[in-house]
Amino acid sequence: MSDFAVLDAPVTSLPGIGKVKGALFEKLGIRTVGDLLYHFPRAYQNRGAVSLLASACLQEVATATVLTVGSPPTSVRIHGNRIMTRFTAFDDSGKCVITFFNQPYIKDLFTIGSAFRFWGRVERMGRNYQMTCPEYEPFSESYRLPDFLPIYPQTEGLKSKAISQAVGLALHELKSLPDPLPKDVRQAHGLVDLLDALRAIHLPADYEELNRARRRFIFEELFLFSLGMACGSKKEELLPENRIENVDLAPFLKALPFSLTRAQERAIKDMQKDLSGKTPMSRLLCGDVGSGKTACAAAAAYTVMKAGRQVALMTPTEILANQHYKDLAPLFEGLGFKTLLLTGALTPANKKKVRAQISRGEADLVIGTQALLTSDTTFARPGLVITDEQHRFGVNQRSILSGKGDQLHTLVMTATPIPRTLALILYSNLDISYIDELPPGRQKVSTFKVDESYRARLNGFIEKQVMEGHQVYVVCPAVEQEDPENGKTVPFGYRPDAPSDLPPLKAAVDFSKELQQALPSVKVGFLHGKMKSGEKDAVMTAFARGELGVLVSTTVIEVGVNVPSATLMVVENAERFGLSQLHQLRGRVGRGRDKSWCILMSQAKEDSPAGHRLETLCKNYSGYDIAAEDLKMRGPGDFFPKPGESTRQSGEFAFKVSFACDDPNLPPLAAMAARAVYDADPALGKEEHLETSRALKKLFRLSENTLN
Ligand code: ADP
Ligand code: MG
């Protein structure tokens, strides 16, 4: 079989995988052998970190030990007709009784004096230790066992071990593989080829090898993403009648209740230039929360409406649509334009009426949720589509733009602070304007880092805020439970120098009980992602109304929540959060007139990496400064969604490994490499780009005519 054919062959073509198992693999999204090979471990058992029995016993999870067999195994029949086989083994720190059930054949394996690496939980047994049914591998000084054993995302009925075996079989079949990274790109950036990288990512000999493979796959993902965005953003020339020139903004500016900041002026100038340019505008407006993006979008809308075209303003939520309608309808009314609102709250009859008005061209500006405006709404004379709060790059811009004509101008707005080098790759299909200045007179949320010794004072402060009629958020990190079965593991994005002795986590539900006991006079509620959406709404509403004084929550409140009377944000285990996330959390307070605070509770030492992070937050208030610091300190991985976090919509790119990127140079290098390939061969038709093109089509589900 050729290697192409191996990759495309169904997993059921592998020995030992029939229909039933095949269906389980399909549950994990694995249909072909290629899918299987790209199903990367989520973590690795660190069997290279061998402990002595005495210290292994102190750990509550599975650990690696190397022991020498000290007594011959003996088998006895026990109740339930089971056979128990036992022997002792030892290391320099003590003696361990090892027990297996129903495996009498191991008698011949564990001969006196032979050494094994065991993996399992070590427990005390009198003055000795014990292990029950550990995993084992023969150990010898001359043959080095791999340090890392892969742990795969698994599913009911299909365990990691079975996946590992299937991967082993697939890898065994392969002699060479076509590589989606062109050879010269690999050479220029010192990247291992696909087959070696696959072998190393699934069964790395050591940390260095794992790291090389990881680097290659991260580069590959960023490269393909960037190239796909470039291929998808081919623009056609703007017809002269769709160019919008010579519109005087003076009446609009006069109608605004404030004068623009310089950053807003710059962004508006960028857009005026786009609208009168040779190709349709496709611009991203990046600006921190409250930087005044709406006014900039309104200026663009005014320009387009003045030229006789309609504008659609799309929002992710109805709340936001209503808010924009309230602000913009009167403004434009005064300037002679009609604004309509199209939301799910309208009756079917009213929706129909609004849609008819849009298609007859009676509305100049239409505000609504994306779903309503992209479905069966037709515009008589469309000119500009604005999308607000385009978070991350979750929704594929391509899908928003499609269907309404390629001659449309588009504007996308986001408040997610992304360092500029990363924006280059994430939004490589868009031109970007930054609004890096806040309107004058904004209050700063005073931010402090405190440790447990302040607990009592903090509780007093919380109580005081609530007594004064304010509300308080307390955010706890999501609880990641240690997997007792898999023991001491190393996550995919592992770095050897990362701190491992973190304090115990505060979990939202438990902590809300603790806090309620400490503050009996205050009403404490909790909120987390696993609650039903009705429950969540009820809690949020109670909090917004002030019926709850304190809301203990996971990061579900990170974006979009607006309770202006909340004045205090407490973050527990603040060292667990990324800077950008902390900044977003802090943005939940300081939204009203009252002085607001953000308290970061953490045991992190001042001179530790976490300490520096928290310090940065106490001193900086701009999302962009913070994002730049974050990139410097933590690497780019944090800016990408973790697997499972991206909302897998059709046609959307699913990032799998970029979250583990720790080299700030990698994204810009991958973007540049992609650019160079695109410039040299935009259709990716050259022999050396065939596999690249194949991979792209698969990842983006691009239509045949985008790439030929
Ligand atoms: P965002 O960028 O988060 O969408 P908005 O556009 O909602 O921010 O603006 C936040 C607030 O700031 C609004 O109340 C708006 O009226 C006000 N605002 C915007 N620009 C200015 C300005 N140049 N001077 C004063 N206030 C402004
Ligand atoms: Mg906004």
Image (spheres, helix red, strand yellow):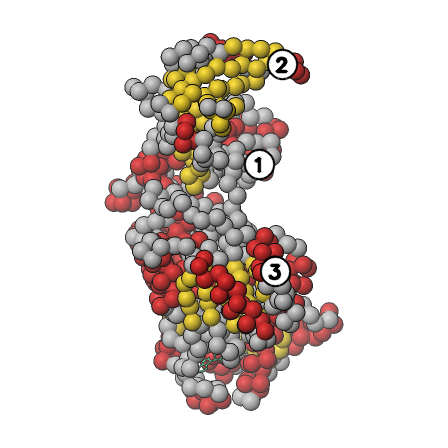
What residue is disc 1 on? Answer: 155
Label 2 element class: strand
Which amino acid, mark 3? Gln
Label 3 element class: helix
Q: Nearer the viewer, residue 581 or 91?
A: 91
The residue most toward the front is: 127
Ranked by sequence position, the earlier of labels 3 and 1 is: 1
> How far across and down, in percent of the image, does residue 589 sit?
50, 70
Which amino acid, mark 2? Ile
For the residues marked 3 and 1, what is the alpha-carbon distance in whole angstroms?
38 Å
Q: Is residue 635 left or right of residue 337?
A: left
Q: Nearer the viewer, residue 340 or 38?
A: 38
Instruction: Please tell me which residue is depicted at 66% across the width and 55% down the height of the picture.
Output: 532
Decide: is 638 above or below 413: above
Instruction: Please tell me which residue is depicted at 39% across the width and 70% down the height of the picture.
Output: 621
What residue is disc 2 on? Answer: 78
